[in-house]
Amino acid sequence: MSKEEENQFGLVYDGAITENEIGKVNIYSVNYMLNGLKISANVYTPANFDETNQYPTVVVAHPNGGVKEQVAGLYSQKLAELGYIAMAFDASYQGQSEGQPRNTDKPQNRVEDIHGAIDYIVNYKGVDRNRVGILGICGGGGYTLRASQTDKRIKAVATLSAFNTGIVRKNGFLDSQINTITERLEDAYKAREDELARKEVRYTPNMLETMTPEEAKKMPFDLYKDGYEYYGITHKHTRSSFAYTVSSNIDLFSFDARVGMEMINQPLLMMAGKMADTLYMTEGCYEKATGTKNKELFLIDGATHIQTYWKPEYVEQVVNKLKEFYAKYL
């Protein structure tokens, strides 16, 4: 039996809630509509939750390829244990949320998903709409930065292992595909035409299906090596996938999370592993955040990108930093 099957809520992270109990942190599955699509989310409420009280609240945006039952759920539960209402949601077209073709991954959708999550949570029982923060993880971090530029309902902005998805899709990881941009764009438009003609929906390769564990261990980048283990073995979930529609590249190639960073005037906390091969993305966005008077770059000694998702000693550091940050600004 898999972790997903063992847990009635489908949660796959360590220490996950197994049942709702009076007086403890509880989890509630909710759905809400966004632009005609039903969005699926989990709301975590703190111990001894009283809906007549007003609680600070944090929305958590999941990584690329991830679902709400993985790392987004872990940090939502940790925040609820600190006394916050927290909500992890599945991006539209992904996870349990509606949308066709499946695993469409367009930046405008991911940003709108965050606005939609805020729309929903500010009206949830017990939420203090004047104390709403956000935590964006990996790709969810890059989209959190973009959403926070205009959505001032978000009072405190935090990212963990932020990933600048558009730049990586366009240039390749660490600029490894920068010489094939035109060819891949031409292919993306061909895929778009095929979708419109209802011929087929083409997807990018999913390394969880095309690669063996032995091959994964030989990959040059920790991000993908660790990612294979996390998403394919230790925290596997049936609705999680590295594959996305090839046509999504049309929109991804023109997205850069660094653009407009000066519009973030809310307090900003950006966290990343000091050993992460994705650290340059956090640093690139942080450098452009010139519009806020309160910003901090917090580096986690020894941690790689994926290790911040699950390794207890790194998770503890992240939670302690979030505790300090949200207590100050929410």
Image (spheres, grey):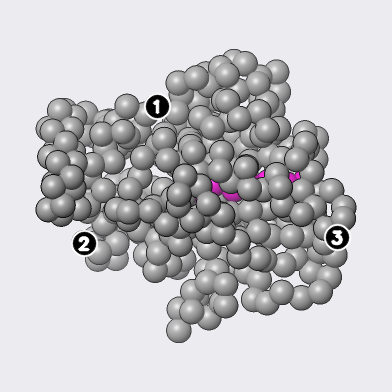
Task: Residue lying at the far front in this picture: please name it.
Answer: 36
Q: Can you identify the residue that label 3 sits on? A: 50
Q: Residue at x 79, y 43 (%)?
A: 128
Q: Which mark is residue 256?
A: 1
CB within 8 Å, label 2 to label 1? no
SS category of the residue bearing label 2? helix
Q: Of 175 and 154, which appears nearest the observer?
A: 154
Q: Which mark is residue 23?
A: none
**Sooner in the amino-acid sequence: mark 2 or mark 1:** 2
| Number of marks | 3
SS category of the residue bearing label 3? loop
**Mark 2 belongs to which amino acid?**
Thr
Q: Residue at x 62, y 42 (%)?
A: 118
SS category of the residue bearing label 1? loop
Q: Which mark is residue 210?
A: 2
- Work out whether residue 287 can be spotted: no
Distance from Cα at disc 2 to Cα at disc 1: 29 Å
Query: Image quadrant for the N terminus?
Result: bottom left
Distance from Cα at disc 1 to Cα at disc 3: 41 Å
Q: Residues within 10 Å of mark 3 (few under 14, many from 20)?
A: few
**Mark 1 belongs to which amino acid?**
Asp
Q: Residue at x 56, y 77 (%)?
A: 7
Query: Which one is in front in this view, the residue at disc 1 or the one at disc 3?
Result: 3
| Residue 256: quarter of image | top left
Which residues are drawn in magenta?
56-62
Distance from Cα at disc 2 to Cα at disc 3: 48 Å
Q: Of 121 and 160, which appears nearest the observer?
A: 121
88 on left or right of 52: left
